[in-house]
Each structure stands twice: as structure tokens, then as C-alpha cells.
């Protein structure tokens, strides 16, 4: 590579110049000094140079344009970076709040029990005779998404009652049943169930993408809460049965809520429901017709809204909640 010029003479030689700077070319023989006519003010000199010395401003204009373009691109890029950082900070803040709440509830089981009792009392409603139209799924309307409140199930169904009914039909071993029953009846698990019920209702009968997106986000948050409070030594076993039980309780809820629409809840309905829940929880599809192993006879003996099962199940659930707190740390957020 040729070395750059070091001396002035080398510079002239590299540029093929005899002298530098060159005298500007003028259209006539009159010098610039003569053109000024002894008026050496700034405005006179500027005017004279402008009229007699050619100067191309295009490179300067192009440079200014490119600088402006780069400035705009830099500004847009900076806004994107700041926006991503703001979202990350919000996510981190939410996760920290979630962990702190879980830790607090795990440390104070009495407080957890008290809050669970309050929530349970607010959800319990007396059975009111309903019109026949309320038992048809086509006449049901989603009550709307509320950020800090779960949407109640149709016909005053109680989520804990339905969960209790389903888990009793699984024939779990006695030692396993005592532990897992608390997990299934935890507030996080109940929140997953209720929001999943309404998400599936909208998906099947009255699609509303915006509400479904809100519900799905809250289902994910609730599932995280449930996952964190399940003991490590039982996580694998519990989440192997959880998607199947969740599918069952959603199916039972539809049958109980809409007894006049059972024709809608056939084999295809169960197939699609099970596929969805298994993929949500485990990321994998279940075996074909896994729902055929469900103890449907046990689930359909009496209606939850009827007197017999209503009285027995509600009393057992209430006694359990009063005597022992729902799973520590499974507070719904």
C-alpha cells in the first residue's frame, strides 16, 4: 500500500499539482479585489464570493440529509430499546410480586385459611329455582372479563364442589388423596378451572378473541402459582393426572350448567377439550379417547345443583376448609 504524503512537496506530487491552492477560474481578467471596489465589508465579500467563486452545495446537502436520516433511525431504535426495557421491568416487577405473595402465604398459613374462608363464603350462594332457558348453553352469555375478579360459573355452580366431585371419582390411594385434594381445591387450581371453563365456552359457542386472550393470560399466571406451591417430590406425579382431572371438571361443569344442551357435549366435544387441556398443561396430546376411562357414571349420579349432592359436598368441603388451610402458597393473584 502506498504511504500517505508526509511533506507538502509530496502532497503536491501525489495530487499532480504545481501549486496549491489553485487560483479560482474567473470569467474575466478583473481581480476580486478590483470587483470589491475597496468595500471590504463582510456582506460585500460574501456577495462577491457568491457571484464569482463557484461552489457546489450538493455534497453538503446530501450530507445533511443523511445525517437527518441517521438521526431519525437512531431515535426509532432508541425508542424500541427503551420500550423493551420497560416491558422487561414490568415483567420482573410482576414476578417479584408473585414470589413475595407466595412466600408470605407459605409463612402464614392461618392468614391463608382466613382469606380462603372469606373467599369461600363470598362464593357460596343459595340455590334459586331457575327458568328452563338458563339451562341451555345457547342462552348463556359470558359475564365479561374483570381483572381482579373471577367470573362466576353459570347457575351458581361452585368450583370447589365440582373439583371435589371429580377427584373423589378418581380412586386415588388414601395417602395420595389427602395431599392432592388440597392442591386441587387450592385457589390457584380453582382459578385455572373457572377461567378455562369460560375460555372453552367462548371458543366453542360465542367466540370473543379479546376476552379469550385476557382469560388465557390469567390462566397462565394462575398455573404458575399452582406449579410453585406443589411440593417438589410430588410435582411429576401430580401434573401427570392434573390435565385429565381438569378436563373432567370442565366437562362436568358444562353438563351441570346446561343440562338441556347435553347433545352438544358428545365425543367430539370431549376429544377437543382433552386435547386442548393436555397441550396447555403438558405440551403433548393425550392418547386417543382417553376420556373413555372417566368414571362418568359416578359423576352423573346426582346433580351438583340438586339437594342430595349439594348438601353432602358443600358440607364436606366447608369442614375441610375450616379444619385445614387450602394449600399454603396457592393464593390466587
Image (spheres, helix red, strand yellow):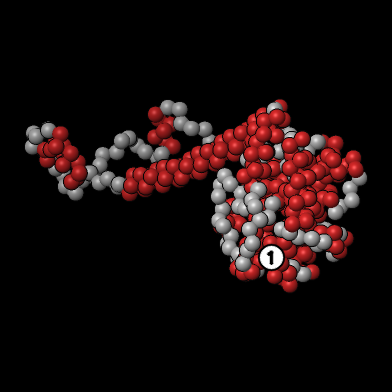
Q: Quadrant of residue 24?
A: top left
Expressed as whole percent of the image width and height from the top left, the position of residue 156 reads 65, 55
Check disc 1 and report the residue beneath it: 258
Q: Quadrant of residue 106?
A: top right
The answer to whether residue 54 of the structure is visible from this angle is yes
Q: Work out which quarter of the rendered image holds the C terminus and state it.
A: top right
Question: Residue at point 8% right, 37% down?
Answer: 37
Front-lying residue, 281 or 9: 281
Expressed as whole percent of the image width and height from the top left, the position of residue 317 reads 76, 44
| Direction bottom: furthest residue | 263
| Direction right: furthest residue | 173
Question: Residue at point 12% right, 40% down?
Answer: 35
Q: Is residue 199 left or right of residue 278?
A: left
Expressed as whole percent of the image width and height from the top left, the position of residue 207 reads 60, 64
The answer to whether residue 290 of the structure is visible from this angle is no
Front-lying residue, 8 or 87: 87
Amino acid at each position: 500500500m502506498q504511504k500517505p504524503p508526509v511533506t507538502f512537496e509530496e502532497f503536491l506530487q501525489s495530487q499532480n499539482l504545481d501549486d496549491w491552492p489553485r487560483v479560482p477560474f474567473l470569467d474575466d481578467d478583473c481581480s476580486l479585489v478590483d470587483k470589491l471596489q475597496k468595500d471590504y465589508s463582510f456582506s460585500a465579500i460574501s456577495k462577491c464570493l457568491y457571484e464569482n467563486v463557484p461552489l457546489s452545495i450538493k455534497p453538503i446537502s446530501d450530507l445533511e440529509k443523511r445525517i437527518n436520516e441517521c438521526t431519525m433511525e437512531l431515535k426509532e431504535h432508541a425508542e424500541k430499546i427503551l420500550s423493551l426495557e420497560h416491558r422487561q421491568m414490568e415483567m420482573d416487577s410482576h414476578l417479584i410480586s408473585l414470589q413475595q405473595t407466595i412466600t408470605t402465604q407459605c409463612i402464614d398459613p392461618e392468614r391463608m385459611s382466613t382469606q380462603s374462608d372469606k373467599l369461600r363464603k363470598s362464593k357460596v350462594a343459595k340455590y334459586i329455582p331457575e327458568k328452563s332457558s338458563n339451562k341451555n348453553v345457547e342462552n348463556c352469555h359470558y359475564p365479561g372479563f374483570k381483572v381482579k375478579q373471577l367470573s362466576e360459573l353459570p347457575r351458581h355452580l361452585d368450583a370447589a364442589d365440582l373439583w371435589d366431585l371429580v377427584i373423589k371419582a378418581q380412586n386415588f390411594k388414601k395417602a395420595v388423596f389427602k395431599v392432592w385434594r388440597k392442591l386441587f381445591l387450592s385457589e390457584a387450581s380453582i382459578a385455572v378451572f373457572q377461567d378455562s371453563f369460560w375460555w372453552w365456552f367462548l371458543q366453542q359457542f360465542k367466540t370473543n378473541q379479546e376476552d379469550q386472550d385476557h382469560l388465557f393470560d390469567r390462566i397462565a399466571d394462575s398455573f404458575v402459582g399452582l406449579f410453585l406451591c406443589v411440593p417438589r417430590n410430588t410435582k411429576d406425579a401430580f401434573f401427570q393426572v392434573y390435565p385429565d382431572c381438569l378436563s373432567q371438571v370442565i366437562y362436568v361443569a358444562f353438563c351441570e350448567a346446561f343440562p338441556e344442551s347435553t347433545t352438544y357435549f358428545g365425543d367430539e366435544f370431549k376429544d377437543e377439550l382433552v386435547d386442548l387441556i393436555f397441550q396447555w398443561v403438558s405440551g403433548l396430546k393425550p392418547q386417543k379417547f382417553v376420556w373413555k376411562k372417566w368414571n362418568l357414571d359416578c359423576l352423573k349420579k346426582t346433580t351438583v345443583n340438586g339437594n342430595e349432592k349439594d348438601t353432602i359436598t358443600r358440607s364436606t368441603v366447608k369442614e375441610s376448609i375450616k379444619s385445614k388451610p387450602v394449600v399454603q402458597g396457592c393464593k390466587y393473584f
